[in-house]
Image (cartoon, rainbow, N blue to C red):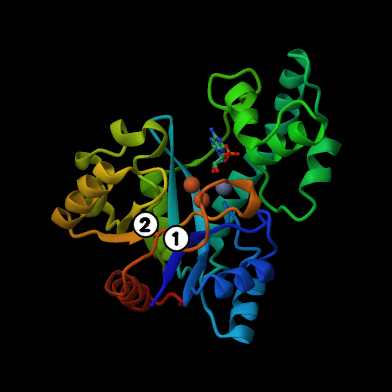
Amino acid sequence: MRIDLHTHSRVSDGTDTPTRLVLKALEAGLDVIALTDHDTFDGVPEAVAAGKRVGLRVVPGIEMSTDVAGRSVHLLGYGCDMHNPALNRELLAVRTGRSRRLPAMCEQLSEVGVPVTMDDIKAVSPSARSLGRPHVADALVAKGYVADRGEAFDKYLAEGKPGYVARYSTDLARAITLVHDAGGAAVIAHPWSRGNDDVVTASLLESLVLGYGLDGIEVDHEDHDADTRRLLFEMGARLGLIRTGSSDYHGAGKEGHALGCNLTRKSAFLELVSRIRARGGSV
Ligand code: AMP
Ligand code: ZN
Ligand code: FE
Ligand code: FE
């Protein structure tokens, strides 16, 4: 059974429609995927319907932008009630923060000689319900200032670069509670990517397990090398965490993240499903 629990569509910063994503997952020989767009469920109904048509199981998911002591940590939520009011209020607050920072980013980019307007950003993201730096990157590419998203982040958009503007994100512990209260299971995405190993420490994970019932961590991810995967796998085992693996597929938006390049073991998936069912979520 081939299970990939972290993918993005063009409803956030992926490049495929939810339907196309499902068809590509089928072509890649997957049996189960989760659609986990950033801070929005808007692509899920289309993906679930497409999955039903072609016989591929689509788990409703989300990737929430969260904050730990000023650092960005991503939390995957699986099987949540997509209409849960508290969760949706919070997601709206995050998406509003995402949109509100864009004019400031445009202004800063024009100050360093690479002017981009809100119209440029909208032109490259017509289907996006959740706007992010990758869309600003696409606008920089479209205007010919950089070759790809990677160069856009390296030169302008990464933290500390001239186009960077911070935004609101949910406190991590609170996000876990929101996911659980919506019936879902909470898994920290790529815990040690981008230098986050000094944020997502063993002691933080232990406190999230004991205090908030964190369900799992994503171990097999392209941002983790072999040593990192082994350390996280062992740490997760000690803490009783479900350990997942996934592609974090973004279509053409992220190189080297092919669908199914990392997989979740069937036993881990079944444990997630049983926790979601126990909380009344849908999967
Ligand atoms: P945002 O959520 O708008 O702040 O943008 C963060 C997203 O940009 C992440 O989810 C990544 O997918 C992507 N990203 C962050 N840093 C980089 C980078 N250095 N190169 C390419 N993509 C990046
Ligand atoms: Zn993304
Ligand atoms: Fe992420
Ligand atoms: Fe992701």
Question: 28 left or right of 183?
Answer: right
Q: Which residue is mark 2?
A: 187
> Is the Cβ of the residue at disc 2 closer than 8 Å to that at disc 1?
yes
Residue 152 visible: yes
Query: Which labelled disc corresponds to residue 77?
Result: 1
Mark 1: which amino acid? Gly
Residue 215 visible: no
Q: What residue is shown at x 25% (from left), y 46% (from top)?
A: 205
Q: Give how far across and how far down residue 276 sits, in percent.
A: 37, 73
Q: Residues within 10 Å of mark 2 (few under 14, many from 20)?
A: many
Q: What residue is shown at x 65% (from left), y 65% (from top)?
A: 43
Question: 84 left or right of 96?
Answer: left
Q: Residues within 10 Å of mark 1 (few under 14, many from 20)?
A: many
Q: What residue is shown at x 60% (from left), y 62% (from top)?
A: 41
| Residue 177: quadrant of the picture | bottom left
Query: Which labelled disc corresponds to residue 3?
Result: none
User: 75 above or below 271?
Assistant: above
Q: Give how far across and how far down residue 30 sits, in percent.
A: 48, 73
Give the alpha-carbon distance from disc 2 to disc 1, as whole Å: 6 Å
User: 181 above or below 129?
Assistant: below
| Residue 200: quadrant of the picture | top left
